[in-house]
Amino acid sequence: MRILLTNDDGVHARGLEVLERIARTLSDDITIVAPLEEQSGKGRSLTLTEPLRLRRFGDKRFAVTGTPTDAVMIALAELMKDAPPDLILSGVNRGANLGEDVSYSGTVAAAMEGAHAGIRSIALSQRYPDQGMGDRVDFDAAEAWGEKVLRPLLDAPLAPRTLININFPPVAADVVKGVKIVSQGLRDYGRLRLDQRTDPRGYDYYWLALGRMPHTPVAETDLEAIELGYITVTPLHLDLTHVESLAMLRSAYG
């Protein structure tokens, strides 16, 4: 089984090292193609106004000067064009990708690109308990449970153009309650916090901060399950059509 690894935290991220160790429990045929620098929050963005450059860091280990989606595209169209991957794993992201995070996440976007190409694709993320942890984020739950969570998905009959989004709770591996199959939740709006500062020339600038706002999770969602200490597994699909609204809109347009 050929496995492509990517992420949005960059080719040198600790989470990618964790993912490689997990992947090598499944196969010895591993190729890494990841962004050269961190690309968190880039979603499915593409680099269209400047060239992409490819750097090699070792055998089957590459970095792309672009987004996670760019990295997957170059992997499939160039680096692995003669031997496409059977599986794409994206992560392990430093931080959760729950609820509406999936539409911002470069980690999930890389898996979306794989799913669009017809390849079994899985995004993995490790939630952490406190803001501003930097390199102190603990990947213990992801490392210990990664193989156990992935193995049932290797032969599962996934629907076309779907992907799997996995999140590990911010607890020690030995107190993880298990795996829960859940829907994507949705937080109450209002998560954005602006950190306004002034540069030495007197001009204001801003840091965007996405804090953990209070939410009212519906039962059996990823937001609820991870709070209870479960690993969440959520199927996502690329078709964003709200089917229930089609009849209403047809009626509205006569």
Image (spheres, grey):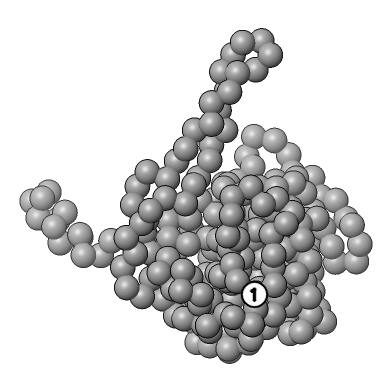
- At x 70%, y 50%, the residue is 134
- At x 64%, y 74%, the residue is 172
Q: Which residue is mark 1?
A: 172
Looking at the picture, does residue 108 appear above or below residue 147? above
Q: Residues within 10 Å of mark 1 (few under 14, many from 20)?
A: some
Looking at the picture, does residue 100 appear above or below residue 27? above
Asked if residue 100 lies left or right of residue 137, the reply is left
- Of residue 83 and residue 3, the one placed in the foreground of this image is 3
Q: Where does the image place residue 50, in percent across and percent down from the top left?
A: 70, 35
- Of residue 207 and residue 58, the one placed in the foreground of this image is 207
In this orientation, does residue 235 appear? no
- At x 64%, y 34%, the residue is 49
Q: Where does the image place residue 150, in percent across and percent down from the top left?
A: 62, 82
Q: Where does the image place residue 33, in percent across and percent down from the top left?
A: 76, 60
Considering every residue shown, the one lying at the far right of the view is 58
Q: Amino acid at mark 1?
A: Ala
Query: Mark 1 falls on what kind of element?
Result: loop
**Quadrant of the image occupied by residue 237:** bottom left
Q: Where does the image place residue 212, in percent across and percent down from the top left?
A: 47, 51
- Of residue 184 and residue 215, the one placed in the foreground of this image is 215
